Image (spheres, rainbow, N blue to C red):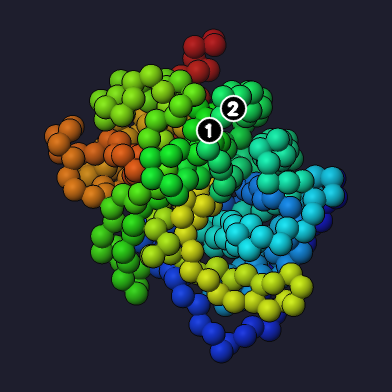
Amino acid sequence: MEDRMCQIHAGLPFPTEIAPEGYTPAQIRRAYGFSARLDGRGQTIGLVVAGDHPRLLEDLGQFSRFFALPPACVRICRQGDPPVLQSCAWRLEAALDVQWAHALAPGARLLVVCAASAQMRDLIPAACQAARLGAGVVGMSWGNEEFPEQAAFDQMFAQCPDTLFVAAAGDWAAVPFYPAASPQVLSVGGTRAILSRQGDRIREMPWHGGAGASRYSPVPPFQQNLPEIAAVSSDYRVVPDVSFCGDPDYGAAVYVSDPQSGRGQWQQTAGTSFAAAAWTAILAGARQLGAKPEIADLYRLARQNPAGAAGSCFFAVGQPATTRGGKQVWVPGAGLGPPKVAALQYALAEICKNRDKAERLHIE
């Protein structure tokens, strides 16, 4: 495995003739209530991509310069000798992950692990490698249709208990992706978020992305006894757990260049890939406060204060729910909902502190 450590400064020449389309970091931060203080400082975000992307860091530099972001500290690790993938989709995927994890958690270190191929047999071990190298949160903004043998990969995630794995639920209607369908992974769905030029929220509703019941993963304890989830499936894991802006029609700006010519361009994109990358940054901010959140902690918070209730850590989406006194706990397509980021981070810190205290008292 080859390691490369570098600090990317935003001082590269930039092609000013083409302005970016899509939401900016300032709009997204305002819309979801990010705190400048909780920038992920002291934390490591792992991001897993397939193959090698030789201009990944240069593109991050261009993105950072344009949006006046601070320097990014990035470490790139390669499993074996991964090929340079010519796929435009994978280049965009990698650029999206790195640029937006940095935009939303600019104080966090980024650990990019390049898997030897786009096959699960290489991607999942790469995610676990990121955990072993110190990432407290690992983003997997990709996935595929489920398969009968996926439980073997679940066991690999379970061997990294100090890391929270985050995955895109998928962009196909009613088709959950794996690894998002794993009970060991936080599944992130997408919403259609309509924002003003300043980043004020106009409207947000569930999107059509990969929502529904797993074919193979049993329902985990944190999803039991929720009538909204039982209405979808009482026997199998249901995705997503949470959500974020995901509809590409209302997507985010990403800078991507061709590996041969070096010519770059802005693209507007999103999907649950963007949503998953955003959640890695959110969780890094929570860990900055000393929290080591588990998926179950998010469900505990949502049960205590459903979306739409005073003090909730999640925004309500779509039409008002008819359960829990008109408040939403879990919504098809959006899960517990998109986050009120700073409120969620502080609440996670508190609930994790109380959970850890209760566990210590139980042991004693």
Task: Please name whichever residue, 94 or 302, is drawn nearer the observer in this view of the structure.
Answer: 94
Question: In percent of the image, x 34 and y 25: which residue is there?
Answer: 233
Name the quadrant of the C terminus: top right
Question: In percent of the image, x 56 and y 48: which residue is there?
Answer: 141
Mark identifier at residue 76: none
Mark identifier at residue 146: 1
Task: Please name whichever residue, 163 or 262, is drawn nearer the observer in this view of the structure.
Answer: 262
In this view, 148 is above or below 43? above
Q: Amino acid at mark 2?
A: Gln
Quote the CA–CA distance across marks 1 and 2. Answer: 7 Å
For the question of whether residue 4 can be seen, the reply is: yes
Q: Left of 208 or right of it: where is 166?
A: right
Question: In percent of the image, x 34 and y 57: which residue is there?
Answer: 192
Please tell me in which quadrant of the rendered image residue 175 appears: top left
Could you say where residue 279 lies in the image, as x and y percent from the top left? 49, 48
In this view, 59 is above or below 177? below
Could you say where residue 316 lies in the image, as x and y percent from the top left? 26, 47
Q: Secondary structure at mark 2?
A: helix
Name the quadrant of the N terminus: top right
Task: Please name whichever residue, 240 or 258, is drawn nearer the observer in this view of the structure.
Answer: 258
As drawn, which residue projects farthest toward the bottom?
A: 17
In this view, 247 is above or below 312? below
Q: Secondary structure at mark 1?
A: loop
Q: Which residue is mark 2?
A: 150
